[in-house]
Image (tube, rainbow, N blue to C red):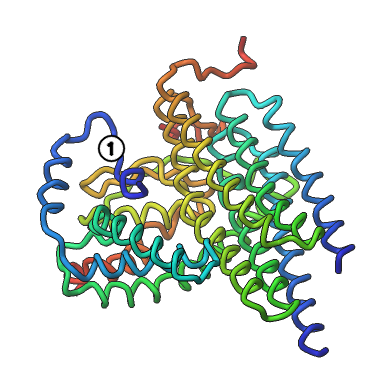
Amino acid sequence: MNNFFLYSGIFLCLLMALSLYRALVGPTVLDRLIGVNAIGSKTTALLILIGILYERVDMFVDIALAYATLNFIAVLAASRYFQKKKGLYDERQR
Amino acid sequence: MLLSIIGNSIVIILVLVGLLFFAGGAVGILRFPDFYSRLHPAGKLDTMGVSMTMIAMAVYSLLHGFTLTALLTSLKIMLIVVFIFITSPTATHAIVDAGVRAGLAPWAKEDSGEEAP
Amino acid sequence: MKKDQATQRRDDSPRSSPSDDSASRSKHPIVPFILTFGISFATWLVLSGKFDLFHLALGVICCLLVAYFSADLMFYSHRPKGLSGQWFQFVKYVPWLLGQVLIANWHVMKLVFHPNMLEKIDPKIITFRSRLRNDMSLFILANSITLTPGTITVYVNTFGKYTVHVIDRKSGEGLPGEMEKRVAQILEPERYE
């Protein structure tokens, strides 16, 4: 069972690398924001997996809760900030 | 013994389905043409993946022995699921609102170009 | 916080809403107070995990304060006596919503892994009018639309005008229909009798 969780965690890390591609090359700022948000929600699940692997779920679940909150607030703040700036152009056209 | 086998298989199936949803979200973010349509897999397939995996782990932490700590841990995990179910649409809406206010044009097909606003 | 998010209006919308809110905030009905206290105290118990007298007393004090300040934020109702019926309807609504979310998730999964996906999708922004008037039910319908894959609420105004981004024709077809009816059953059933 531990092996299963270990491989699930590795698979999640691979998926996070895929989302990181969008966060690195996304044409607009909001595309990068989407990539970062996707990485954040995968991290929440990954933290619980790590907790099961180290057999300290009771500790890691608090970290995961804080991380979910932080991810949500970061996305809200960033999108509120960038909608005030009128600089959301498609970066490929420059 | 039988209970643990059934519980473990439920956990494995839920985690696999959750990972499938996660994979759909990641591939969808890469493949879709513009950022409005990228939000569809990003916001919601990820939500589904998180809730599936989290429910699986809540079941798993109960399987090890029905103590008060395990019960509190799985309740906390369910709290994260509820939290994500409420906040994820809000975050998606915030991003799409930022895009609309900044005036990004949605991608549309060429043959139906006149229907696009 | 959540209500503020959902009912945040566009720039051109009327600005009379704060006065409405402050008018309904002056009275403190007892049932929303008790419900808010119960929910926040249950959250306290789950998060703290300590059951000695000191922590329980701290929790009771904090939850009383929170319930006093924000009882009218969570249970936004013009008809306080229908509150328990509302919650029963809401509990019936959640499993239906989860079923819809599962079906629609499967649909988007098929789209994502489809080999020539660019021909299958047809992103479009559509608008429709809803007959709901209550702020809370507008918020629930908007969040339900966003949670159902294939559709994202772009914005809502107080008069029930929804602007929705749909990803293909099939997702947008059933939009104002059954979901609106079920949300209306929760909060304003008199409109659908």
Q: Residue at x 64, y 36 (%)?
A: A35
User: With A85 as the anchor, is C19 left or right in this view?
Assistant: left
Q: Residue at x 52, y 61 (%)?
A: C47
Spot occupied by residue B12 in the image (x, y as percentages of width and height) = 78, 70
Q: Chain for mark 1?
A: C
Q: Quadrant of residue B102?
A: top left
Give SS at disc 1. Answer: loop
Residue B78 to residue B116: above or below: below
User: With A86 as the anchor, is A67 left or right in this view?
Assistant: right
Q: How many marks?
A: 1
| The residue positioned farthest toward the bottom in the image shown | B2
Q: Nearer the viewer, residue B79 or B6?
A: B79
Q: Nearer the viewer, residue A82 or A50?
A: A50
Q: Nearer the viewer, residue A68 or C111?
A: A68
| The residue positioned farthest toward the top in the image shown | A94
Q: Is residue A6 visible?
A: yes
Tag 1 residue:
C9
Spot occupied by residue C117 in the image (x, y as percentages of width and height) = 68, 45
Spot occupied by residue A83 in the image (x, y as percentages of width and height) = 43, 25
Q: Quadrant of residue B63?
A: bottom right
Q: Residue at x 27, y 50 (%)?
A: C129
